[in-house]
Image (tube, grey):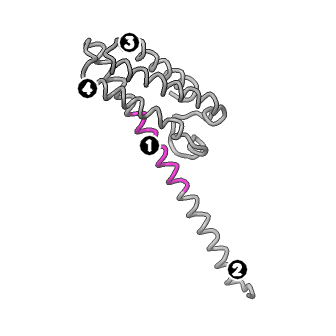
Amino acid sequence: MRKTPLTKALLGGAVACTLLLTMANSMADTAEIMEQRQAGFKTMGKSVKAIRNALKAGDTTTPAVKDAAAAINQEASQLAQWFPEGSGPESGLSTDALPYIWKNTEKFQRISQDLISASAKLVSALDAGADIDAPFKAVLKTCKGCHQSYRAD
């Protein structure tokens, strides 16, 4: 096939369109992941608030408290998946996530596992009808440790 100037222009245009579509799809995927993680963190925040309020009121035996603890544990199990490469500040999208997440993924994975473990202990304490003060404080300590290292506040 002989490449005329028109053929070259059409091929170049097709390549450019393909690249733009790929970039747009990638940006949409990144935005979706960021929305998922923001929603997950909002769920955890609301759940922490519900448990804190129940502790202040002196009644942690309600189904709402168990649901809140289960929600923290469920979201914690997804946490590590919410931060794929390219979903940080370099994406150009608004995020409080610091680049350190992707520079020290081993520590981030460890903190994620710590939150899963701490929140599972909170769920177990509630299921057993035990005092939840210590397991709830462990959840909060894990959250704080992650925020200090990986979140721009």
Percent across and percent down for residue 18 are: 60, 67
What's the magenta bit mostly, secondary-structure-wise?
helix
State yes or no: residue 35 in magenta.
yes
The residue beneath circle 2 is 8
The residue beneath circle 1 is 36
User: Which quadrant is the N terminus positioned in?
Assistant: bottom right
The residue beneath circle 3 is 133
The answer to whether residue 76 is above or below residue 61 is below
Which labelled disc corresponds to residue 63? Answer: 4
Secondary structure beneath dot 3 equals helix
Q: Within 10 Å of the Cα at label 4, are there few (<14), some (14-19), or many (20+) other Cα atoms?
A: few
Q: Residue at x 40, y 29 (%)?
A: 72
Q: Residue at x 50, y 41 (%)?
A: 94
Quadrant hosting residue 90: top right
Percent across and percent down for residue 132 are: 36, 14
User: Of marks 3 and 2, which one's residue comes earlier in the chain?
Assistant: 2
Disc 2 vs disc 4: Cβ atoms closer than 8 Å? no
Q: Nearer the viewer, mark 4 or mark 1?
A: 4
Distance of mark 3 from mark 2, alpha carbons? 70 Å
Q: Nearer the viewer, mark 2 or mark 1?
A: 1
Disc 3 vs disc 1: Cβ atoms closer than 8 Å? no
Residue numbers of the magenta segment:
26-42
**Could you tell me the amino acid type at mark 2?**
Lys
Quadrant hosting residue 11: bottom right
Percent across and percent down for residue 107 are: 62, 27
